[in-house]
Image (cartoon, rainbow, N blue to C red):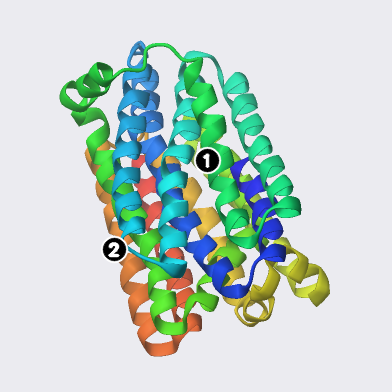
């Protein structure tokens, strides 16, 4: 649901702000997405491994406590940095300072509920949270000035997240400390692996901004949102596989990767054929640049679909340590390709480097999956 509403949110913000502010919003969104990646590493994957071994899942509240407190500490650092800066940089950091804990609260609640209350209940609450976020942005877009519109998605989601926490029991600093101290082997390898991936995600807009400016930074985010249907299905597939598992990993891999690859190609074809005015409604002023790199982004999305399924199937087939190491290797390869491509060819090179890295990782995960099954 977060991927679906992010399309609506980006489209609304894009219609109310200029290209530079849209770039700032894009960078803040990427920073906030660190919580989206870390929530399953701190909460989802450790609990999934416990469930796969038949162990009772009693530590869910401790895991969420650690995740939420960690995000608040990170938010404090971003807020201090925002107060020491100005202009677009301040807007970017302030938005991220609000977004990091907001996303972590909502996403960690989802993973806690998956293993304590069932995936249907968890999914319903997650969908409701992001639907309220989209409604808040609609209201802001109709009534507030541009800077407030940039902040509105993050503020709305934080309000929703805090409201959810007020009805939760078992969250405490003591529980967080127990999770950090006593359960470290169950989550630390995942966090280290995901942290490498998060650093990569944070580096993408920074590298693109350094080589082509704030306006080009919005292109990567615009590409993600233009492929929102593909991203939505990738997210649903990986979340379901992690939450429910599978007895036939090879057959599941073939079925899911084939279907998602077809979806990605069709998504790219639709974007290539849609009139410019329609695409501009979705991505705003990033539309011309997105047109120029559409083929590269399509290839990257296809490869991402394949590598995502391979990666999530390996979570319960290898040890937490090896899973974390795979994430570190994947992030390192992607970062290397990103840097080389951006230095040589600017925006096109950066996106092409990411596409090439995803293709290489898809092959690596496929070979590992064959070996383990």
Query: What is the spatial separation of the Cα atoms under label 2 and label 1, in whole angstroms?
Result: 22 Å
Asked whether, in this view, residue 170 is left or right of residue 30, the answer is left
State which tag comes first along the sequence, 2 or 1: 1
Asked whether, in this view, residue 100 is left or right of residue 132, the answer is left
Q: Secondary structure at mark 2?
A: helix
x and y percentages locating residue 325 in the rendered image: 24, 49
Q: Which numbered tag is attached to residue 332?
A: 2
Q: Secondary structure at mark 1?
A: helix
In this view of the protein, which residue sits in the foreground, 121 or 86? Answer: 86
Residue ID at (50%, 72%): 217
x and y percentages locating residue 111 in the rendered image: 46, 27
x and y percentages locating residue 222 in the rendered image: 61, 66
Q: Which numbered tag is attached to residue 199?
A: none
Residue with the mark numbered 1: 238
In this view of the protein, which residue sits in the foreground, 19 or 212? Answer: 19
x and y percentages locating residue 161 in the rendered image: 51, 30
Asked whether, in this view, residue 306 is left or right of residue 132, the answer is left
Image quadrant where one finds the C terminus: top left
Residue 246 visible in the snapshot: no
- The picture quadrant where one finds residue 178 is top left
In this view of the protein, which residue sits in the foreground, 223 or 25? Answer: 25
Image quadrant where one finds the N terminus: top right
Residue 357 to residue 59: above or below: below
Residue 340 visible in the snapshot: yes
């Amino acid at each position: 649901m977060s991927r679906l509403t992010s399309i609506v949110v980006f489209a609304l913000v894009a219609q109310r702000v200029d290209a530079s502010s849209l770039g700032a919003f894009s960078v803040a969104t990427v920073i906030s997405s660190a919580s989206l990646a870390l929530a399953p590493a701190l909460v989802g994957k450790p609990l999934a491994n416990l469930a796969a071994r038949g162990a009772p899942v009693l530590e869910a509240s401790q895991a969420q406590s650690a995740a939420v407190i960690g995000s608040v500490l990170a938010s404090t650092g971003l807020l201090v940095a925002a107060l020491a800066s100005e202009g677009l940089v301040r807007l970017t950091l302030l938005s991220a300072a609000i977004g990091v804990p907001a996303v972590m609260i909502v996403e960690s609640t989802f993973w806690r509920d998956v293993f304590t209350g069932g995936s249907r209940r968890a999914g319903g609450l997650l969908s409701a949270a992001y639907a309220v976020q989209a409604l808040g942005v609609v209201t802001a877009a109709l009534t507030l000035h541009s800077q407030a519109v940039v902040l509105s998605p993050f503020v709305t989601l934080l309000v929703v997240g805090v409201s959810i926490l007020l009805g939760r029991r078992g969250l405490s600093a003591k529980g967080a400390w127990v999770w950090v101290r006593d359960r470290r082997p169950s989550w630390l390898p995942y966090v280290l692996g995901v942290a490498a991936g998060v650093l990569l995600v944070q580096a993408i807009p920074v590298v693109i901004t350094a080589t082509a400016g704030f306006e080009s930074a919005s292109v990567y985010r615009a590409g993600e949102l233009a492929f929102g249907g593909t991203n939505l299905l990738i997210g649903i597939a990986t979340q379901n596989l992690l939450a429910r598992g599978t007895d036939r990993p090879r057959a599941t891999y073939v079925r899911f990767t084939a279907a998602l690859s077809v979806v990605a190609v069709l998504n790219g074809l639709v974007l290539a054929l849609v009139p410019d005015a329609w695409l501009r409604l979705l991505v705003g002023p990033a539309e011309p640049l997105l047109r120029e790199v559409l083929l590269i982004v399509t290839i990257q999305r296809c490869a991402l679909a394949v590598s995502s399924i391979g990666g999530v199937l390996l979570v319960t087939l290898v040890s937490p340590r090896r899973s974390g190491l795979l994430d570190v290797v994947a992030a390192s390869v992607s970062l290397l390709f990103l840097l080389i491509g951006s230095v040589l060819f600017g925006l096109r090179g950066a996106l092409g480097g990411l596409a090439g890295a995803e293709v290489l990782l898809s092959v690596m995960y496929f070979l590992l999956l064959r070996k383990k099954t």
